[in-house]
Image (tube, rainbow, N blue to C red):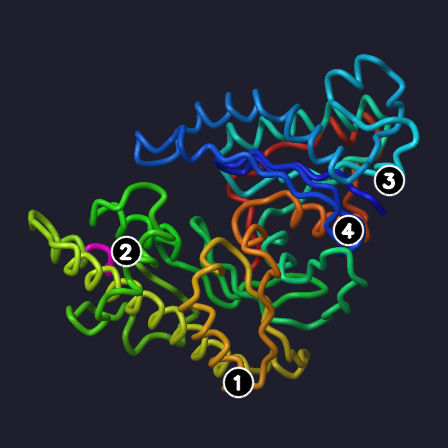
Amino acid sequence: MTILAIDTSCDDTAAAVTRDNRILSNVIWSQAALHAKWGGVVPSLAKRAHQDRLPWVVSRALRLARANLPNSANLFTRHSFGVGGPNSPNLIAAIAVTVGPGLAPALEAGIHYAKQLALLHEIPLIPVNHLEGHVISSLARPNLPNSPNLPNSLALIVSGGHTQLVLSFPSHRILADTLDDALGEALDKAARMLGLGYPGGAVLEKFAKQGNPQKYKLPLPLLGRENQGAFSFSGLKTAFYRLVEGKELTKQEICDLAACFQSTALDHLIRVVSKTISHFNHSSHSNNFDFSDLLIGGGVAANIELRKRLRKLGKQFDLKVHFPYSKKLCTDNAAMIGLAAQWAFARGEAAKTQAEINLIDRQPNLTFPSL
């Protein structure tokens, strides 16, 4: 099944074409420069930028995949949506779109555009949970045979908006969730405190490589309470603010502070994941699951230090750890939405009639249920 997927959950306008677990194209237009001067994403600006760029992004995704939408002989369709010619080898069978979680105005832009396409070309529209996209992103393959299905897996989502340990397949259930900030958000805010700009998580990582993670003492969140199925980064962020507030910092001090914050944040993450897995292994629920795989998704999954620690954790619990094959699949993208749409379609979640399509709406606070 060949799917055209659209994601506008935050500040990246993305479109992709996927078939099964293979990615035929994956186009992302970033709004980072647009929001940088505000120090964060402005929802109204994001919505307008999505509306402006969606036709071009969708057109490019279709052309790169040599894909074609039905009814493409229609001149309005060809010029407005930029689809390929009638001899295109890949015929789009359905449209997929992120319905949540995310910024409500941004989600609205993508959903409205996807509805237009689905109705115009008379094909199903598949609403997709952005979080399921992150879970499945590590199963993508670049023009290779499909990945094997993993009926019982653990998944760790580490992004700017979410930090969750999830029991996955065939459904998704939260084992541990953040009480406040997500890991990616905390890293971005720490970078901003050090004057490293927005978004700053990746920049913080670069500075941390040159720093001493033992130079400054920061409190480890929820110390002694890691088996309660919760992450927390707000207290660490507050302690870090007090440490750097009003100080003129040298470059080496910035590197040391970046290393200390990143190391402490990752220490907390790994401790909670480890304690939660151990607790789950000894609970009554574990009798129904036999997991041997850990799927990693989200923007922070690109962090090299985090990858090292997760591989070590995998060896500790005899888990095979899966990362997205490309860092482009870690951040928000539409390819993972196309992959997740295959599962959603199999569950019967596609809207096939005009009435069903019109009912699809944004769900900014969409999440998974708890176990």
SS state under label 2? helix
| Mark 4 to mark 2 CA distance (whole Å) | 36 Å
Q: Quadrant of residue 219?
A: bottom left
Q: Which amino acid does label 3 sit on?
A: Asn
Residue at 80% over, 24% down: 119
| Mark 1 to mark 4 CA distance (whole Å) | 31 Å
| Mark 1 to mark 2 CA distance (whole Å) | 30 Å
Decide which of tag 1 and tag 4 comes sooner along the chain.
Answer: 1
Please tell me the numbered disc located at residue 234.
2
Query: In the rendered image, which residue does mark 3 sit on?
Result: 90
Q: Which amino acid does label 1 sit on?
A: Lys
Q: Position of residue 346 (x, y in %)?
A: 82, 53
* Disc 2 and disc 3 in contact, CB within 8 angstroms: no
Q: Which span of residues is magenta-colored?
A: 235-239
Query: In the rendered image, which residue does mark 1 sit on?
Result: 315
Decide which of tag 3 and tag 1 comes sooner along the chain.
Answer: 3
Instruction: Give the number of the mark in front: 1 or 4.
Output: 1
| Mark 4 to mark 3 CA distance (whole Å) | 16 Å
Residue at 36% over, 50% down: 185
Instruction: Give the number of the mark in front: 4 or 3.
Output: 3
SS state under label 4? helix
Q: What residue type is labelled 4?
A: Gln
Query: In the rendered image, which residue does mark 4 sit on?
Result: 342
| The stretch drawn in magenta includes residue 236 | yes
| Mark 3 to mark 1 CA distance (whole Å) | 41 Å
Residue at 80% over, 13% down: 76
